[in-house]
Image (cartoon, rainbow, N blue to C red):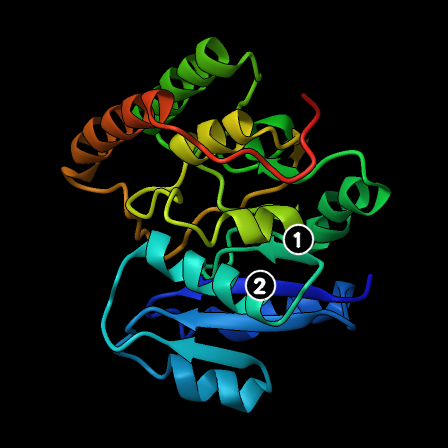
Amino acid sequence: MHNLLVIIPSFNEEKNLPGVVAGIRRVLSEADILVVNDGSADATASICRDLGVAVVSHPWNMGYGVAIQTGYKYAYANSYEFLVQIDADGQHDPADIPRLLEPLAAGSCDFVLGSRFLAEGSYQPPLTRRIGMKLFSALIKVATGECITDSTSGFQAFNAEVIHFLTGDHFPCDYPDADLLLVLHRAGFRMIELPVVMHSDEGGRSMHSGLRPLYYIFKMFLSMGVNLIRSVPERPGRAQ
């Protein structure tokens, strides 16, 4: 597939990046790769240059949501037709990328979410986090009618319309998970979920560790509530 950008948001992932980039190149040799270096204190930027991939560096750590939106703005500015988003920690398997791109290339959807809960043998997160995921999946079902099993998945693919849409101010920068899916649904984008394999994070680091899950749940409830009542621009050409 031509005119494809793969973005990798990264914060202190110098050990994992070479393997992730190599995995992407094995399955998509023609794809462009962009690493969004979110204020890393390690050698992320220089490693990206050594690997021959584009890198955009934030001057300090601005958070996951800001990092991925930087990638979207880069993709929009450079007129990419399709975008794949994959984590830098090695948990996602690049071999799944072609499966995510198939329905986009066929024009049958606009946004594809990779779900670890639909794949056999995929890594399962801790029980408390799974409970939170099921809670937000239930809220999405009530609010949109969409059956989403893995609302926190960072393994995604989408087309140029979604790329453009997500560069706007309506993008939820704090934790773009369930609230993002709600915004996309309200705007009229077609979403599907497909199975992907997720490996365990050997480093044991997560933005949902410690007391952060409580803050995350509060923020997600608040964000979903706000996005249910505020106006959301419709996608161009949406059927009336």
The residue wearing badge 2 is 76
Q: Is residue 42 left or right of residue 192?
A: left
Residue 160: which numbered mark, if any?
1
* Residue at 33% in and 68% down: 38
Q: Name the amino acid type tagged 1.
A: Ala
Labels 1 & 2 near each other (Cβ < 8 A):
yes
Residue 159 in view: no
Q: Quadrant of the C terminus?
A: top right
Please give the name of the residue rendered at 56% of the width and 27% of the height, measured from the top-left corner: 117
Q: Is residue 25 above or below residue 179?
A: below
Taking the spot 43% from the left edge, 69% from the top edge, the residue there is 36
Quick check: 94 left or right of 99?
left
| Quarter residue 94 falls in | bottom right
Q: Dot 1, crowdedness within 10 Å: few (<14), some or many (≥20)? A: some
Callout 2 secondary element? helix
Q: Depth check: give the residue in front, 132 or 102.
A: 102
Viewer-closest of 54 and 42: 54
Separation of residues labelled 1 and 2 (CA atoms)? 7 Å
Name the kind of residue labelled 2 in the image.
Tyr
